[in-house]
Amino acid sequence: MKGILLKELKLIKKDRRSFIFLLLMPIFFILMYGSIGGGSDSSRIALHVIDQDQSAASKAFIQQLDGIMDVKQDAASSLDTQVLKIKKGQLTEVLVVPKGFGQDLADGKQSELPFYQDASAQTTIAPIQAILNSVANGYREKKLSDTFTALGETGEQAQAALASPIAVKNIQTTSEQLSYLDIIVPGMTVMFVFFIMITMSKRFFEEKKTGLLSRIRSTRIKPMEYLIGMWLPFIFTVIIQCALLFGFGHYVYDLNLGDLSALGLVIVGLSIASTGIGMALCFLAPGESAAMVITQVITMGGALLGGLWMPSYLLPDMMQKIGKFTPQYWAQHSIQDIIVHHAHIADVWGGAAILATFGLIGLFIAFLRLPRFMRAAEN
């Protein structure tokens, strides 16, 4: 078994195509998707504003909005252009602070602020309208407070008069939000791990074609020793692949890896799952081409159902239920628990055990199918 193990390690080391596909390709995808969404702050609502008044009051008003939303100020002369963009679907909204805004506030008059909006984009507009109404109510309460004070009321009496009969009590809870990179780095890593099955099928069918498998059958090497000797080098390859990709995510994108011992446990479980399933595939597939097609189905289908491309909770209920029967689901969720929710070994050992179970079932199937595979190699 030792000789088989060393032979496979040397062959994997020489296989440059596998190195490119298993390591450089996921790095390329992480870089590509990371550059698209990794640096953007999508948590703040954007609002386009045109200040036609350019007074101290209008600037203070816009500054107040900018503390809540991502305010993008446009030139006063660009109103027609911005309205045209809304009509073309290139823009969803623009708020106009009209000329005379500051003077109206000073005189106690109501100032109307035109809010141009795309009627078909209410999902985007509704939060902006809620914020604008909240800010407007703040100005209204300030005006009422000044009026009460002018009538001889004390500050406390004015506050009591303005107090709402209903109060909402805010109770803070902790929520760890997934960032774009928290999905992409683990997702691309887990997805490309399963492409090891292409390398595995290539190796087994090559040994079958060259007659090496027939010669091994004539020796004293037991079937299980042969399987383990072929299996372990691929497990080591996947572990190294994961370590390099997560290291890349950490040093390039400052991805927090959490508890490294817990992450290592999940990576070991993932390596057993991917290579164990690969062992079963090698002996179940009728040929190398069929094995490659099946690998694509397992890899891409598992990526979709397992939440490697998007959070699982965004998928339809039926797909979420099916996804729990894939090893990709347990790998992705266990890794995200470590990265996002600061989970430790006690929290993820169950997911790692499920991953290992997938792999051991695959190894058992491979053991049952190996004699038939060897007999076919003699013909």
Image: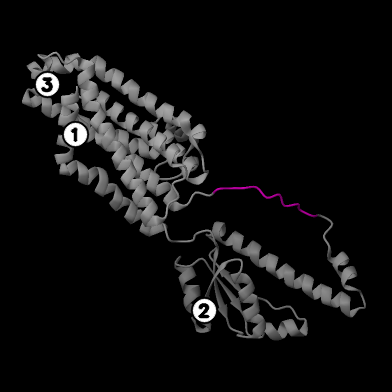
Magenta-colored span: 167-176
320 or 20, nearer to the observer: 20
Task: Locate residue 325, reporting x and y percent.
Answer: 42, 28
Q: Is residue 355 visible?
A: yes
First in sequence, mark 1 or 2: give its number: 1
The spot of residue 313 in percent (x, y) is: 50, 41
At numbered mark 2, what does the secondary structure look like: helix, strand or loop?
helix
Quadrant of res 265:
top left
Q: Nearer the viewer, residue 322 or 3?
A: 3
What residue type is disc 2 on? Leu
Contact between labelled residues 2 and 1, with CB atoms less than 8 Å apart: no
Q: Residue furthest right?
A: 152
Q: Residue shown at 24%/23% (left/top)?
A: 228
The tag on residue 9 is 1
SS state under label 1? helix
Q: Is residue 232 magenta?
A: no
Residue 213: give its label: 3
User: Where is residue 372, by image quadrant?
Assistant: top left
Look at the image and say whether residue 170 sits in the magenta stretch: yes
Q: How far apart are the two marked residues, 3 and 2, measured between alpha carbons?
A: 76 Å
Name the element at disc 3.
helix
Label 1: few (<14), some (14–19) or many (≥20) C-alpha neighbours in 10 Å: some
Q: Amino acid at mark 1?
A: Leu
Label 1 and label 2: CA atoms lie apart by 67 Å
240 over 284 or under it: above or below: below
Mark 1 or mark 3: whose residue is earlier in sequence: 1
The picture places residue 43, in percent across and down from the top left corner, at 53, 58
Numbered disc total: 3
